[in-house]
Image (cartoon, rainbow, N blue to C red):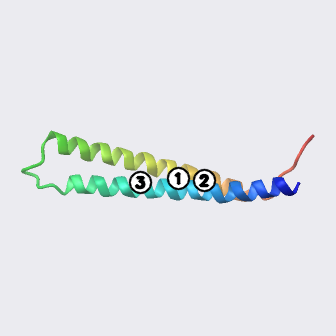
Amino acid sequence: MERFEEEVCLVKAESSRVGKTFRHLAAEWKNQAEGWDNINFERKGNFEAGAASASWRRHDVFTRLAERAEWYHSQLLAHERFELTS
């Protein structure tokens, strides 16, 4: 039982880092997208517009992944007691 409790603590700690990692990646893609968006309008071509669009899509994906990971982590913390059945 001691080993199980240790594993539960590890899972809780690791699951908290998943959401943080996705938040970090979302912020990185947001910075990338804003960089493409800040290019002078006269110089912006199809490549820059496409790069900005792709960066914003990746930002949105990682934001949704972070929200989902944070929700699952909160559910894990809400169920403090585990019942073992044999």
* Badge 1 amino acid: Glu
Q: Residue furthest front?
A: 3
Residue at image x 41%, y 54%? 26
Residue 8 falls left or right of residue 69? right
Earlier residue among tags 3 and 2:
3
Q: Which residue bears the numbered disc 3?
A: 26
Q: Return the x and y of residue 70 as percentages of the image width and height.
A: 58, 55
Quadrant in the picture for the C terminus: top right
Mark 3 vs mark 1: give the one in front.
3
Residue at image x 43%, y 45%? 61
Q: Which residue bears the numbered disc 1?
A: 67
Tag 3: Cα neighbours inside 10 Å, few (<14), some, or many (≥20)? Answer: many
Q: Give the spatial CA distance, label 3 vs label 2.
A: 17 Å
Residue at image x 61%, y 59%? 16
Q: Which residue bears the numbered disc 2?
A: 71
* Badge 3 amino acid: Ala
Earlier residue among tags 3 and 1:
3
